[in-house]
């Protein structure tokens, strides 16, 4: 598109037409302190070569997880993604395909979605999964809406140890509905007292496993208590690799699983795009949001795939859709499927084992340091450290030494008394010398 | 009492002060294979014209409106597992809900079977 600036006269005519005096009047809803005054401190023009050079220099200041020892987690995990995953999703048939409604020309995409759903259902221990959501947080919010529809109740209980971003997205989503959520406070010790809150008006309890602090729990009893009260149990899993080593939410009696699939097939990418997983029991499939791909046969009896149960606004239910989610993370779900297919069941389990054993060994080394205490009694590949110093300061000092040492809890829970807490994730990408570097750097700093 | 029909293709059968409601044979033919029926909650109060149910077929999701006002006293639980009852037996086993009517005269204005037959012939 050509750049066609408006003339002063044209602007005046438009402003007059809509009844405002100036362009600034259009922005009065935005608080003055949040608005820019004047121009940004940028040159007015530069050559393409200079712009590229400038941005390369800026990018060079980043400490990248791919070039430094990386112990970052808190909902986004660095794992090794086989190059074939990236290669396959960049095939133009997949990369450029838009809204694969037409089964006659989209069998590849549809079959990939079907395989994806099968993989997600298997690892979560559920009976049915959809063709993906935007990310784990929206999947969590949609799970709450779904539970409210299923139970015809209006209240949800959110665990205090649910990832803060997931809580935020759920809260934001609910504020425009008739549903509401009770949010419990984050807790470092012991189990949360959900029972005190579960009543006949509760649609669901939302828990995370491993939780925000990395703790692993068995929610079998909670599932029973929910069911006794006619409520559903929603289990959020934001490190999906953990399911290779842990009892699945399905085995615990969960009714809905909301997951983040980024760990498999999808790079960190500064936070997105990611891939949300949503799985449930067959009996709730009608209230499931998003798309579902089904297997069928054509008129010649040959196996084929079609989108089905598309209870979304662009399909047959229109304004009666169960959700306003209007797409799925198609390409990311394909990457997930390719990576998962390469791993296979044994590979997935082995990957989980490596993650856990590396994390356990690292936790032991760190716990032995003066000024460091691992507060978790259980964890998968991420745990919380209590440091003798401010965690944000420590992370800055580690970064200065070229180490991405973890996520200070205070970055995500700014209101809580958590200044000394540090989340540390250890995956298969953390080499032995990376771990050594972290341990010796922390020893120096603390 | 015989079935009465609405212009939206619902049927009503009033027995005492309880009205059973479903959709007509013509409606199920137009809808095609019914794959899901969302029935109302027992105990909910409906006014005439309120949405009573949603019928989802392979090609459309259609609202079913309540021809009468009153409280829902029963719903057809069999539809959950067998929505095709709407296709197979629209005037019988495919019923959606029973409503305790608050104003039985609301049914007086509806069509009887002959009038409905004439009405749908006019639609084709």
Image (cartoon, grey):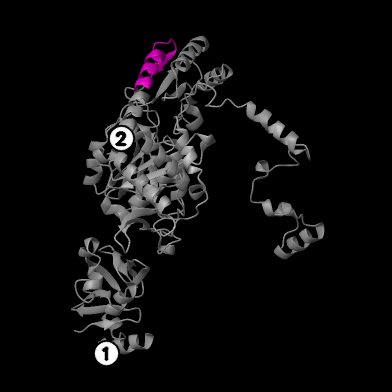
Indicate whether A117 appears above or below A21.
above
Using the rendered view, name the quadrant where residue A41 is placed: top right
Nearer the viewer's eye, disc 1 or disc 2? 2
Question: Which chain is indicated by disc 1?
Answer: B
**Residue displayed at 54% across by 35% down:** A270
Label 1 Cα crowd, 10 Å radius (few <14 / some 14-19 / many 20+): few
Dots 1, 2 in contact, CB < 8 A: no
Q: Nearer the viewer, residue A389 or A146?
A: A146
Relative image position of residue A102 (x, y in whole percent): 43, 60
Mark on residue A209? none
Q: Residue beneath label 2, please?
A: A345
**Residue displayed at 25% across by 65% down:** B83
Indicate whether A129 appears above or below A349.
below
- The answer to if A359 sits in the magenta stretch is yes
- Magenta span: A357-374
- Name the element at disc 2: helix
Relative image position of residue A323 (x, y in whole percent): 41, 55
Image side of residue B21 versus residue A188, left or right? left
Q: Nearer the viewer, residue A111 or A122?
A: A111
Using the rendered view, name the quadrant where residue A310 is placed: bottom left
Q: Residue beneath label 1, please?
A: B114
- The answer to if A261 sits in the magenta stretch is no
């Amino acid at each position: 598109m050509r750049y066609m600036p408006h003339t002063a006269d044209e602007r005046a005519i438009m402003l007059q037409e809509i009844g405002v005096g100036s362009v600034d009047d259009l922005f009065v809803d935005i608080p003055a302190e949040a608005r820019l005054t004047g121009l940004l401190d940028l040159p007015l023009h530069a050559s393409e070569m200079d712009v590229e050079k400038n941005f390369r220099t800026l990018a060079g200041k980043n400490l990248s997880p791919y070039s430094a020892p990386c112990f970052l987690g808190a909902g986004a995990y660095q794992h090794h993604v086989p190059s074939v995953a990236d290669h396959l999703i960049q095939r133009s048939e997949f990369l450029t395909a838009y809204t694969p409604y037409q089964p006659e020309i989209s069998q590849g995409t549809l079959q990939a979605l079907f395989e994806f759903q099968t993989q997600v259902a298997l690892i979560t221990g559920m009976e049915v999964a959809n063709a993906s959501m935007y990310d784990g947080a929206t999947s969590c919010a949609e799970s709450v809406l779904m539970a409210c529809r299923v139970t015809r109740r209006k209240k949800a209980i959110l665990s205090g140890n649910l990832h803060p971003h997931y809580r935020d997205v759920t809260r934001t989503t609910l504020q425009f509905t008739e549903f509401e959520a009770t949010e419990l406070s984050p807790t470092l010790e012991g189990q949360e007292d959900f029972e005190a809150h579960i009543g006949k008006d509760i649609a669901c309890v939302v828990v995370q496993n491993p939780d925000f602090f990395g703790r692993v729990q068995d929610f079998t009893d909670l599932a029973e208590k929910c069911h006794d009260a006619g409520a559903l149990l929603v289990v959020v899993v934001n490190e999906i690799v953990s399911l290779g080593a842990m009892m699945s939410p399905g085995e615990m009696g969960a009714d809905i699983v909301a997951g983040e699939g980024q760990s498999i097939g999808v790079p960190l990418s500064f936070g997105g795009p990611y891939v949300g997983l949503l799985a449930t029991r067959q009996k709730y499939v009608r209230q499931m949001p998003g798309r579902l791909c089904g297997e069928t046969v054509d008129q010649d009896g040959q196996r084929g795939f079609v989108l089905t149960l598309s209870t979304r606004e662009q399909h047959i239910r229109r304004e009666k859709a169960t959700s306003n989610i209007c797409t799925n993370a198609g390409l990311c779900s394909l990457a997930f499927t390719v990576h998962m297919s390469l791993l296979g069941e044994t590979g997935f389990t082995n990957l989980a084992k490596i993650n856990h054993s590396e994390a356990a060994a690292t936790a032991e080394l760190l716990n032995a340091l003066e000024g460091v205490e691992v507060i978790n009694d259980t964890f998968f590949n991420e745990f919380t450290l209590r440091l003798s110093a401010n965690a944000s300061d420590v992370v800055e000092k580690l970064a200065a030494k070229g180490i991405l040492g973890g996520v200070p809890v205070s970055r995500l829970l700014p209101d809580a008394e958590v200044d000394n807490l540090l989340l540390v994730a250890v995956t298969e990408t953390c080499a032995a010398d990376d771990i050594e570097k972290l341990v010796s750097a922390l020893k120096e700093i603390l | 009492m015989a079935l009465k029909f609405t212009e939206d293709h619902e049927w009503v059968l009033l027995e005492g002060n309880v009205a059973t409601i479903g959709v007509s044979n013509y409606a199920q033919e137009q809808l095609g294979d019914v794959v899901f029926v969302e029935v109302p909650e027992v105990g909910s109060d409906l006014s005439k014209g309120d949405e009573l149910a949603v019928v989802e077929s392979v090609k459309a999701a259609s609202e079913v409106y309540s021809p009468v006002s009153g409280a829902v006293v029963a719903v057809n639980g069999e539809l959950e597992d067998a929505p095709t009852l709407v296709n197979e037996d629209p005037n019988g086993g495919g019923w959606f809900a029973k409503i305790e009517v608050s104003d039985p005269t609301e049914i007086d204005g509806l069509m009887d079977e002959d009038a409905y037959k004439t009405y749908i012939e006019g639609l084709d």
